[in-house]
Every structure is written in C-alpha cells, then in structure tokens.
Image (cartoon, grey):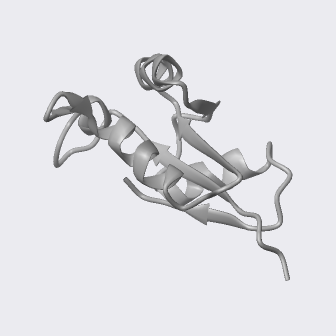
C-alpha cells in the first residue's frame, strides 16, 4: 500500500462567478493561501498549485508554495491538473478544488 500522495490545486483568475477568486482576501489572507494551509493539514508529500496566471504564481511563491505553470486553454480544473501531473512523479495525485 502506498501512503504518500501529492495534492494539485488548480487555480485561475478568470472565474465568471467570482473573478480573481484565488487572490481575493478573506480575513487578511488570500483564498489560495488558505487552500494551501488546509492542504498542508492533510500530510501530503507535496502540494502544487497549477495555474496559467503569473499573478497567482507570484502570490503562491511569496507564500512559500510550489507552482506548476499550465496552458490557459484548459476548460476545467481537472484538465489543468492532468497537464500538471505530467511533471510530477507520484503514484497518487489528489485533485483539490479550491
């Protein structure tokens, strides 16, 4: 049995329901940094944010997170995770939608 797993969180700025959601501030912290904190509590081996946004990349890296840049043509977060997963060596990848 494999105990180790990796989390990938897809993030984009172009949401139609709540534009710029990952960078929105919630009680003094960005939404994406809150998602990273919650993902850390899972004891994942690694946590990556998959994004096509330089703004998200910079925010995540400033927070100490890891980023995988992906294409801007993805229609879903799962598509974005599939691309990011190609760059990761892991048997188990957990899709966490923030």
Q: How many numbered marks, from 0 up?
A: 0
Q: Nearer the viewer, residue 36 or 55?
A: 36
Q: Position of residue 30 (x, y in %)?
A: 28, 32
Please state if 20 lies on the left or on the right of 51 as rendered.
left
Q: Quadrant of residue 28?
A: top left
Please state if 94 lies on the left or on the right of 85 as rendered.
left
Look at 61% across and 42% down and name the residue there: 48
Please state if 12 lies on the left or on the right of 78 as rendered.
left
Look at 79% across and 49% down and name the residue there: 86
Pick the quarter of the image with the N terminus.
bottom right
Q: Position of residue 77 (x, y in %)?
A: 48, 54
Determine the residue located farthest toward the bottom in the rendered image: 1
Look at 47% across and 16% down and name the residue there: 62
Whether residue 93 is situated above or below residue 81 in the rendered picture:
below
Please state if 52 lies on the left or on the right of 29 as rendered.
right
Q: Nearer the viewer, residue 44 or 50?
A: 44
Q: Position of residue 82 (x, y in %)?
A: 67, 56
Q: Quadrant of residue 56?
A: top left
Look at 82% across and 58% down and name the residue there: 90
Q: Nearer the viewer, residue 7 or 21?
A: 7
Whether residue 18 is situated above or below residue 61 in the rendered picture:
below
């Amino acid at each position: 049995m494999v105990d180790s797993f990796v989390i990938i969180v897809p993030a984009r700025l172009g949401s139609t329901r709540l534009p710029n959601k990952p960078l929105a501030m919630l009680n003094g912290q960005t939404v994406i940094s809150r998602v990273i904190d919650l993902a850390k509590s899972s004891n994942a081996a690694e946590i990556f944010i998959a994004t096509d946004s330089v703004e998200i990349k910079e925010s995540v890296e400033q927070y100490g997170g890891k980023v995988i840049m992906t294409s801007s043509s993805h229609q879903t977060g799962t598509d974005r995770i599939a691309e990011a997963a190609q760059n990761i060596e892991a048997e188990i990848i957990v899709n966490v939608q923030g």
